[in-house]
Amino acid sequence: MWRRGNAVADAWSVIYGGVSAAISRVRFPPSTLYFSVSDDGKLVALSLKTILESTHTTVYYYTEVKIMNIQIFGKAKSFDTKKAERYFKERGIKFQSIDLVSKGMSKGEFDSVLKAVGDIEKLIDPKAKGATADLLKYLGSMEEKREKLLEEPSLIAAPVVRNGRQATVGYCPDIWKNWE
């Protein structure tokens, strides 16, 4: 993504997907490549020192930005849910946390996760206790298990982490790295 702004401004106008937004407190990551356009129209590489000393230079820089829409369906007492939330917090990735026990998943969300995960058995919490959990083990068809999991979201293994059409069940940082 190409961004542009005045090096000494307090807020830059950033063009992203045709939408202009303001970013306050400009940071200059040292690993990013910075350029300016010379009077003859050529791109000129800039050092951070040049940018910070400049008063009227328009600076262009390139950085890869991947936008993720992370949803974490978890349980309040689940350590894996807490680890998943910590993983994304440490990397500065915004996420939406949803309590599986009280809110559950919609049919569409559940079907999307099931399609990404592949097998309904991966969605069943092996630590779940109670009569419903025992019954779930003996249900024959996938459709019956699906309906029971939608009725009793506490039987779903936690955390379920979604990023659009991608999803994982459990703590899977190796897979999440590829999402970044």
Image (cartoon, rainbow, N blue to C red):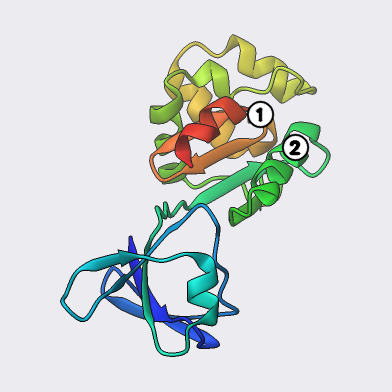
**Vertical relation: 44 (above or below) 52:** above
- Find residue 95 and name its label: none
Q: CA distance from mark 1 to mark 2?
A: 7 Å
Residue that numbered label 2 is attached to: 83
Relative to the observer, which residue lies in front, 98 or 171? Answer: 171
Provide the secondary structure element on which disc 1 rests: loop
Question: Residue most toward the left?
Answer: 40
Q: Which residue is rendered at x = 66% and y = 17% of the image?
A: 135
Along the line of sight, the residue nearer the viewer: 147 or 115: 115
Q: Is residue 32 left or right of residue 149?
A: left
Q: Residue at x 31, y 77 (%)?
A: 19
Secondary structure of the residue carrying tag 2 is helix
* Quadrant of the snapshot with the N terminus: bottom left
Kind of residue sitting beneath label 1: Tyr
Residue 15, image x and y in percent? 33, 75
Residue topped by disc 1? 171
Q: Amino acid at mark 2?
A: Lys
Please tell me whether residue 99 is drawn above or below residue 148 in the rendered image. below
Q: Count residues near mark 2 (Cα–Cα under 10 Å), then give few for <14, some for 14-19, many for 20+.
A: some
| Residue sitting at x 64%, y 38% | 153
* Nearer to us in this view, 58 or 167: 58
| Residue 72 located left or right of residue 134 | left
| x and y, in percent, of residue 81 in the image | 72, 38
Residue at left 55%, top 60%?
29
Q: Is residue 70 left or right of residue 59?
A: right
Q: Are marks 1 and 2 in contact (CB under 8 Å)?
A: yes
